[in-house]
Image: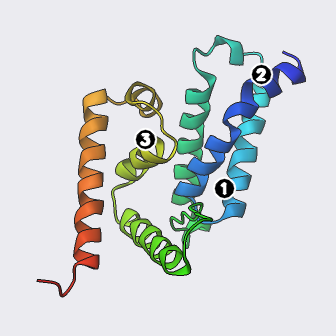
Amino acid sequence: MKQADFVNIVMPFKDKVFRLAKRLLVSREEAEDATQEILLKLWKNNKKIEDYKNVEAFSMTMTKNFCLDRLKSKQAQNLKIVHSNYTDSNSSLQKQVEAKDSVDWVSKIMEDLPEQQKIIVQLRDIEEYDFAEIAKMLDMNETAIRVNLSRARKTIREKLTNTHGYGIK
């Protein structure tokens, strides 16, 4: 496989790899390192790339596994989930503050979700993968994906409602 072919295959989804890594790891730098590592691994195995049915799903699985390994390592004791790519340029300052506050609350709530639910929410709601693709990436049944997603959304919704509804009767 030539470099141009590799670039044509990998570049369309490299941003998704980065966003998943950023969801699972702390910082932009950690996510960039993870993305670079995944791309390097793909390049080293470029002869096998054409054998995979879905290179994007394979790379997302690699990213998930790499990030979880990083989180388990001793160097990653202070890593946490941060998600700050939400912006809206046509709103008032008040709405911007409220939107940022809501995104911050959702991020905090997601920190407490089980690891599997975090990944499923990221892949479905942020990256917009369909259930079949997520099932392949995580090696799970589609029904289990739907159940985990439903539970995660319910937890987020309840905690967000409790946070914003505090003191209101």
Q: Position of residue 66 (x, y in %)?
A: 59, 45
Name the amino acid type tagged 3. Answer: Arg
Horizontal side of 90 relative to 136 (left or right) equals right
Q: Residues within 10 Å of mark 2 (few under 14, many from 20)?
A: some
Q: CA distance from mark 3 to mark 2?
A: 28 Å
Spatial separation of the CA atoms under disc 2 and disc 1: 22 Å
Q: Are marks 2 and 1 in contact (CB under 8 Å)?
A: no
Q: Residue at x 54, y 35 (%)?
A: 61
Q: Amino acid at mark 2?
A: Asn
**Residue at 40% across, 53% down:** 118
39 horizontally vs 140: left or right: right
Mark 3 residue element: helix
The correct choice, above or below, for 97 with respect to 29 in the image is below
Disc 1 residue type (three-letter): Ala
- Label 1 or label 3, whichever lies nearer to me, is 3
Residue 124's disc is: 3
**Residue 31 image label:** 1
Query: Considering only order in the chain, which callout, 2 or 3, is on the residue closer to the N terminus?
Result: 2
